[in-house]
Image (cartoon, helix red, strand yellow):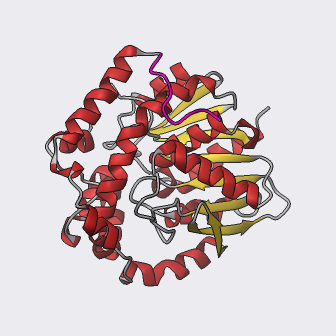
Amino acid sequence: MRPYHAELVGNDAALAAFKDMRAQFQLTPLASVDPQTLKTWRPKKFLWQRLLPLLGRQAGLKSKLSQVDGHRLHYWAGGCATGPVVVLLHGFGSSKENWAYLTAKLSKTYRLLVPDIPGFGQSDFIFDADYRLAAQADRLAQWLKDLGVDRAHFVGSSMGGAIAAQIAARHPDLMNKLCLMNAAGVPGKHLTQLESGLAAGVNYLAPSRAKDAWQVFAIALHPQRRWLGLAFAFLMGAAMSHRKVLNDFLFGSLVESLADTFIQLPSIGAPTLVLWGDSDQVLDVSCADGFCERIPNAKAMILPAVGHLPMLEVPGLTARLLHDFWCAN
């Protein structure tokens, strides 16, 4: 495995952009997380948590629990027991439920494993644990090995894409094919609404008030699906605002380790599909070119009138594209 702090080599301009991002983030209030508040944070049950069992049943999967690196890791499992294994990794501030629409369309053909990444969803957060991307990749790799998984197709959304890329680089024996879906890990050519907000000290992905949850979906979804965002904001707002201090801390770990992900991209040997919505206001669509430039055997597909979450916005199309990619020689 590669060390967490890789030598800074490669694209100097991109690395300088990540360095600037870290420096700017450290100057904002978002980087000033009170350790005592973080240490005493505990999950609570809101409306959203009460709906989780229903979403699992709708997805056709069973809720299960594992232990990895001191964390209780909650995950969905199911689908076709004899089919190829598919691992779906959600994005920042999200959970396995983001995949519910997509899993329903994949479960007849594939064996599905869908975790709440440690620190997120129902999985444990541990105050003094390492939540940088490489550490998360190693945890998930160990979880899969403990389950007896030899190889799998990986799909990573946003932060989950950066973690999936780290798994491909650090644990190539586990990786069959890789899909990076609106993934973090390379700088874009244009500032998005999320990045502009961060520069002003506001993280739209970590609302402090329940009524501000609509902003998360306003930048994550295409405007045509605003109704979907309003519904999610109503259901999830209280739970999201309760996680504010936790998400600010976890976002700092993400920002700190993006450069390391970028550095490791050229070592990815797995066939890679870079899938992106053309209207993404979280991570600019130009990032797709950046991934293709860094990863051998990578190709990009841009989806029109889609934002940051193709698996929620166009699950049928996303499922067909993934199936074609996995079945191609």
The answer to whether 304 appears left or right of 37 in the picture is: right
Q: Is residue 222 visible?
A: no
Q: Quadrant of residue 34?
A: bottom left
Q: Is residue 254 magenta?
A: no
Q: Quadrant for the N terminus, please.
A: top right
Q: Is residue 226 left or right of residue 111?
A: left
Q: Residue at x 52, y 36 (%)?
A: 4
**Is residue 85 rendered to the left or right of residue 311?**
right
Give residue 235's position: percent from left, percent from top. Answer: 34, 76
Residue at horizontal 33%, vertical 59%? 247
Task: Name the image quarter holding the C terminus.
Answer: top right
Q: Position of residue 30 (x, y in %)?
A: 21, 51
Q: How many marks?
A: 0
Examine the rendering and report whether any part of residue 57 can be seen. Answer: yes
Name above or below for residue 170 compared with residue 126.
Answer: above
Residue ID at (28%, 50%) = 219
